[in-house]
Amino acid sequence: MSLESGMREWIPDQVYRSESHTTEVLEYLMAQYANQESPTQAPYVLGVCLGATGELIGHVGLSPLRNQVEIGYAIEEKHQRHGYGTETVSAMTRWGHDTFQLPTVLGVVSSENVGSCRVLEKSGYGLAKEKAGTLHGRQGLIRTYAMSFPAHQESA
């Protein structure tokens, strides 16, 4: 359960009411791995840990979004601005493409969330569109970024 201001502001639907609510969400997410579904069908969410200490500092995931896949991520405030978000998003994007042959991964963020926009841009995502809408219960400009991969060609 995260009570950080950034979580409440940018992804309030991932701030859980209680420990039991957190447990419910985690059990649901872990159950998705047993089925080994594609992220076009079910979410894959992983913890982000510091290599040196094993400390859990955030999460990253791939989830279904209107017949495509969206990347989502959050890094604990005290660990932001150290490149962990960019490293995490880049690694998860590569893994998603390599494992599931995803042709495109989207990143959808509020235009006001400058740090998150910067993470996507540094990870190689390009701005696909910006339009007014509602994201996580907030109205405003929403940016959709995309990372596309060339189609695999069979050798002759």
Image (cartoon, rainbow, N blue to C red):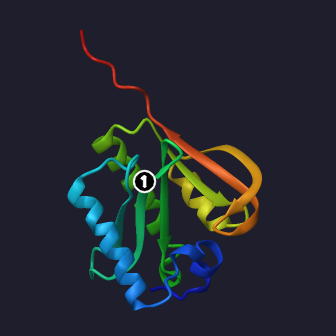
Residue at 45% x, 86% y: name it: 1
Query: From this viewpoint, which residue is outermost toward the left?
Result: 34
Kind of element beneath mark 1: helix
In the displayed structure, 75 sits above or below 63; it is below
Residue 128 position within the rendered picture, expressed as x and y whole percent measured from the top left: 65, 41
Q: Is residue 107 above or below residue 30?
A: above
Q: Residue furthest top?
A: 156
Q: Is residue 60 above or below residue 55?
A: above
Q: Is residue 132 left or right of residue 152?
A: right
Q: Is residue 142 left or right of residue 32?
A: right
- Evaluate whether residue 101 shows in this view: yes
Q: Considering depth in this image, is 53 or 103 the residue closer to the camera?
A: 103
Determine crowd level at label 1: few under 14, some 14-19, many 20+ residues with C-alpha closer than 10 A. Answer: some
Would residue 83 be visible to someone looking at this image?
no
Name the residue at 39% across, 39% down: 102
What residue do we see at 68% from left, 65% from top? 114
Query: Which residue position holds label 1?
Result: 90
- The answer to whether residue 19 is above or below residue 75 is below
Question: Residue 24: x and y, percent?
Answer: 36, 79
The structure residue drawn at horizontal position 21% and vertical position 59%, both measured from the top left corner, is: 34
Which residue is more in the foreground, 12 or 94?
Answer: 12
Amino acid type indicated by mark 1:
Ser
Between 88 and 104, the one lying in front of the other is: 104
The count of marks equals 1
